[in-house]
Structures are given as C-alpha cells and as structure tokens.
Image (spheres, rainbow, N blue to C red):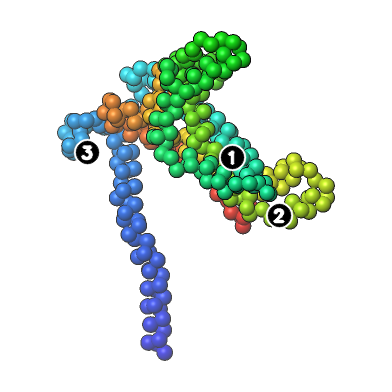
C-alpha cells in the first residue's frame, strides 16, 4: 500500500513538472532573443553609448553612466538635431494612428457589408481582389505611391490636371510638391503639429493599404451572424438601415474593436511605410517616434540616446494599449463580459 502511494506521489510530481519542462526551451529562446536585448537596451539608455563602444560594449573604458540625461535631452528638445521636438512628434504620431483607424474601420465594415449582400455576382473575385493590398509588402506600396505623387511625372498631378481642364477649363499642368512643400494646406489644423501635404499623401496611400485588413476581419464576423436575426427583423418590419445599426453593428463589435486597437498600434509604429515614403520629411513634419529613433542610430550613431528613445516609445505604446484595452475591452472574452 505504501509503495503504491509512493509511486502515485512520484507520478504526480512528474506530471506537475512536465509542463515546465515543455515550456523551458521557449523561455530560453525568448530570454536570449527578446528579454536580454530589452534589458541591455534599458541599461545603455543611461549611458553615453556611441560607435566607439560597440567593440567592448559595457566593458568599454570610456563608457560613462550619465543617469537620465538622455531622457531629459529628449523631452526638453536639447538634442542637437534640427527641427526636433519630442512632443510635436508625439502629437503627430497619435494623430497619424488615430486618423488612419477612423478611416480604415468604417470603410472596411462598409465594403464587407456590401460584399456580403445576397445574390451579388462574382463575390469571391471581389474578396480576393481586396485582399491583395494585405499581402503586398509596405516597402513596395510606399515606392509605388511615392512615384504616383511625383511632382512632375506622377499620376496624381496628371489626374488633377485632367480634372482641372475638364471642370475648370484650365489645362495648365499642375505640379504639386507633395513631399517638399512645408506649408500646411489647412492652416491651424492640429495646432502644434501642422499637417503638410506629405501627410495627406501618406494618408491616401495608407488607406489603400489599411482598409482591406479591416474588411477581412469584418467579413469573417459577418459570416457568424445568424441569418434568423435578419429574417425576424424583416418580419417585424425593420428597414435595412435599422437591421444594420441594431443587428450588424453590435455583433461586429467583438471583432472590430480588437482589430481597431491592432490597427492603431500598427499605424503608431508603421516604420517601413513612412520611412520609405517620406523619410519623416519635409522638415520632420511626418516623423514618427520609430523613424526618429532609427535615424538616431543610422545617421548619428547615438546608441544611448536611441535606446532611451526606444524605452519612451515602449512606455507610450504600453500606456496607449492599456487605456484602449480598458475602454474597449478588446481582450475581454465572453465569459468575462
């Protein structure tokens, strides 16, 4: 009897330890490729780490601990970098992410709803076509749209010239300097971070890139809505608009809110698209936090300052996520609701 109890206890201990053994490789890999760089980055953010310290790292003899100087320099715009103001960049960054989500989500829901109409011909072809931007690399999208907004040969200026000739009778070529003009087309809009033409060009390009994802999410959510609800609503005399606002919109919320939070975070850190389309210009008017952090490393080799900047970006992104998650309950499941 005692031997059986001992064997049972041994088996119980082994079963208790087994999950941790399975998780151990993942923890080791994450420790090396994720947590170690993060901790190292936080440490060097309090130093004057530059190019000459790369060889010896933290063992470099002239590496100095400078406390929170890097953070203070960033917040007080004391960095010797032209046209840099942290809070202006932060304001633009927030506006950039918010304005993209505000456009992408309604457009995605509207198009998904239209393509979900019963009896629509070639529905699968339409859905396959609008998924195409999702699979195109942002670098390619940025390059194509940069050419479209080219001052002299771009399709956008040629289109505006054609429209001007057709409706206004003025056939003079239009040469709008989308990526060079620093004068905001709408004076006073977004005080503190004037929006140049480059911002609007980026918005148009990113709209083409962003709404299909929202439409894919909305399409999946629409398929899960029972048709009985619409049939019952029709019997009760509800119009199409009433069915949309009282059935479709509430049942799309559990899918679209997390997608909107994801879209906001993605746009907030959309480095490759913004960097390759405008490079943060003109005059840093379209600079995001992540593009500026990259410039600190690529152009100036200020690794300590860039590390401090990255820590600030992480803190900002974490606060944004916690607030949006709290308000929208994006990660809450049905059992917790």
Left or right of residue 28: residue 157: right
Q: Is mark 2 on a helix, strand or loop?
A: helix
The CA span between labels 2 and 1 is: 21 Å
Residue 305, position as x, y percentages in the image? 32, 29
Of the image marks 3 and 2, the number of the one nearer the N terminus = 3
Mark 2, other Cα within 10 Å: few <14 / some 14–19 / many ≥20: few
**Which of pointers 2 and 1 lies earlier in the amino acid sequence?**
1
Q: Is residue 193 left or right of residue 248?
A: left
Q: Is residue 43 visible?
A: yes
Q: How far apart are marks 3 and 1 (CA)?
A: 49 Å
Check residue 221 in the rendering and tell me which mark sits there, or answer none.
none
- Closer-to-camera residue (144/226): 144
Residue 163, given in percent of the width and then of the height, sits at 57, 18
Residue situated in front as seen by the camera: 59 or 142: 142
> x, y (%) of residue 258?
55, 45
* Crowd class of label 1 (few under 14; some 14 to 19; many from 20; radius 10 Å): many
User: Dot 1 corresponds to which residue?
Assistant: 108
Find disc 2 in the rendering and name its residue.
227
Q: What element carries label 1?
A: helix
Quarter occupied by residue 270: top left
- Closer to the N terminus: mark 3 or mark 1? 3
**As drawn, 192 above or below 44:** above
Q: Name the residue under label 3.
A: 58
Place residue 151 in its image quadrant: top left
């Amino acid at each position: 009897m005692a031997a059986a109890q001992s064997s049972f206890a041994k088996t119980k201990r082994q079963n208790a330890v087994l999950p941790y053994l399975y998780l151990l490789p993942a923890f080791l890999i994450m420790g090396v490729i994720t947590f170690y760089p993060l901790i190292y980055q936080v440490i060097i953010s309090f130093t004057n780490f530059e190019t000459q310290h790369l060889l010896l790292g933290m063992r470099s003899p002239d590496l100095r601990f400078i406390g929170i100087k890097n953070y203070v320099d960033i917040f007080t715009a004391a960095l010797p970098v032209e046209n840099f103001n942290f809070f202006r960049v932060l304001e633009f960054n927030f506006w950039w992410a918010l304005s993209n989500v505000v456009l992408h989500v309604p457009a995605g829901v509207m198009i998904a709803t239209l393509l979900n109409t019963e009896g629509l011909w070639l529905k699968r072809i339409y859905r396959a076509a609008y998924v195409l931007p999702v699979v195109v690399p942002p670098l390619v999208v940025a390059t194509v749209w940069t050419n479209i907004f080219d001052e002299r040969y771009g399709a956008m200026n040629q289109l505006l010239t054609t429209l001007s000739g057709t409706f206004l009778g003025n056939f003079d070529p239009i040469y709008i300097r989308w990526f060079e003009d620093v004068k905001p087309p709408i004076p006073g809009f977004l005080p503190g971070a004037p929006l140049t033409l480059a911002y609007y060009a980026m918005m148009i390009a990113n709209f083409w890139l962003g709404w299909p994802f929202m439409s894919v999410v909305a399409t999946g959510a629409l398929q899960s809505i029972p048709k009985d609800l619409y049939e019952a609503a029709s019997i009760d005399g509800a119009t199409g608009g009433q069915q949309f606002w009282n059935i479709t919109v509430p049942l799309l919320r559990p899918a679209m809110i997390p997608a909107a939070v994801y879209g906001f975070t993605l746009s907030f850190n959309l480095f490759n698209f913004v960097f390759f389309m405008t490079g943060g210009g003109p005059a840093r008017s379209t600079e995001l936090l992540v593009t500026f952090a990259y410039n600190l490393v690529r152009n100036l080799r200020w690794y300590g300052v860039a590390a401090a900047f990255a820590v600030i970006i992480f803190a900002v992104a974490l606060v944004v996520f916690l607030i949006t998650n709290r308000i929208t309950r994006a990660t809450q499941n049905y059992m917790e609701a």
